[in-house]
Amino acid sequence: MNKTKMISTVGPSSLDKEIIRGLIKSGSDVIRINMSHSNFDEARKIIGYVREINYEEKLLTGIMIDTKGPEIRIGALEEKKLYLEKNKIIRVSESEIVGNKDIISISIHGIISHVDIGGYVYLDSGKVKLEIIEKGQDVILCKILNDGIINQYSKVNIPNLDYDMKFLSNYDMESIKFACENKADYIALSYVKDHLDVLDVNDELISLNNNNIQIISKIENQSAIDDIDEIIKASDGIMVSRGDLGLDTEIEKIPSIQRKIVDLTKEQDKVIIIATEMLASMKDNVRPTRAEVSDVAAAVNDQVDALMLSSETAIGKYPVITVETMKKIIESTEKEIDYLHFLKNSINKGNTISKAISYSAVSSANNICADAIVCSTTSGLTAKLISSYRPACPVVAISPNEYVARGLSINYGIIPVYTRVMSSTEELIELSKKAYRVMLKKDKGVIVIVGSFPLSVNYTNYMKIEEIK
């Protein structure tokens, strides 16, 4: 069973209950809905399918709602796709016009006054690069630097743009409200520029009386990198969204930026996700490239919490095969990880009883080659702490709160289990044994049990090693 989790995006290629079932049974731990491309009716249908599949298959798959964010997009085109020829000149206007090979429009007014001659504009997530050669009041003249085909309403990136767009649009506010009403587990925030954006969303969740949804901040621009420490503190997790990041910064720096963000996020015991073009070639092919396999393996070796598939499962030809392929790469790579080395080089953050117990549980489990750690958790905190030490064995997290259990679906190595309320420590031990047998399908083994003693204590203070015969 993989410790590194998988997030799959549902879109036109996978908007079918049986395909979603295939994604989940092939190893997807979280289903992502991108509100830049989905409407609320479609999102509601996807959530309904996932809930039905979870009930039918006795699983706990998380739901992630990805906000649209303050993005710039190309306007309508005469044809849905437009071919642009290298060295030709094209105008980019703020006026709402239907575009063609001579002129296109962008969705945000006021941008053009903040761009510079000699700067660049990337169309359709970088498929076509333009150089700004002349600037007017509401239009810029650009030279096309490469041949390419762009789609209407696709994304526009302008590196180093010093323009303060409103972070939460009315649509994003409605998306957050929708996520709360439909009990989503995660909100992924697009185009976060600093920690104040995250705090604004947190305030919005408080006003909606929701303290369950976890905030995942997507790092997609230089501004976010500059404030990364504070963004990590304000968030429940971080997603390194390499596509837009590669357009806003020098692309050759992406590997070192990724490693830095991974290390900083893990130091703060937060979830870390790597996204964008993990297996991009599988949109059209049944096999990935060797470079993609190496990319996935490198992220697994860095022991990130999760890897995300975007267009591969949303619009690709082989969504289920792609998930199966990623699972195989993860399984093969994880066999080579030295978990004892990781724990030795990690910081013992045991300045509270719960943290000390969590560290001791992982250390003990690693030393005796335990088959699993079984953790009873009410809030999810102890399970997350245990996960942060990256134990060699799986962590079965049992909780009487379904929302809490499902919210652990993205954390490294955790198998979430929704269980009944326990009345005694003896019952905790018996339920732990049962969860181990059911989830790992083993009749015997050694497990480390973590919980509270007595159960009325509201923090983790108990550890027991149990041999199941």
Image: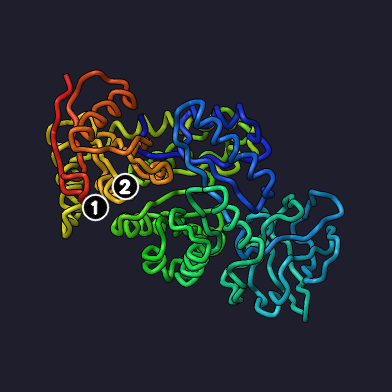
Residue 427 can be seen, yes or no: yes
Above or below: residue 339 compared with residue 80: above
Q: Is residue 291 visible?
A: no
Instruction: Give x and y (percent) for residue 277.
Output: 54, 45
Name the residue rendered at 47%, 37% in the picture. 61
Residue 102 against residue 382 in the figure, above or below? below
Q: Nearer the viewer, residue 342 or 233?
A: 233
In the displayed structure image, the side of residue 244 where residue 346 appears, left or right: left
Picture disc at residue 323: none
Q: Quadrant of the N terminus?
A: top left
Rendering coords of residue 199 (x, y %)? 46, 69
Secondary structure beneath disc 1? Answer: loop
The residue type indicated by label 2 comes to Thr
- Pointers 1 and 2 in contact (C-beta within 8 Å): yes
* 171 on left or right of 242: right
Q: Which amino acid lies under the numbered mark 1 shown in the image of this protein?
A: Asn
Q: Quadrant of the C terminus?
A: top left
| Residue that carries the numbered disc 1 in the rendered image | 458
Residue for point 32% across, 56% down: 263
Query: Which x, y percent locates residue 414?
Result: 33, 39
**Residue on which the image places disc 2:** 378
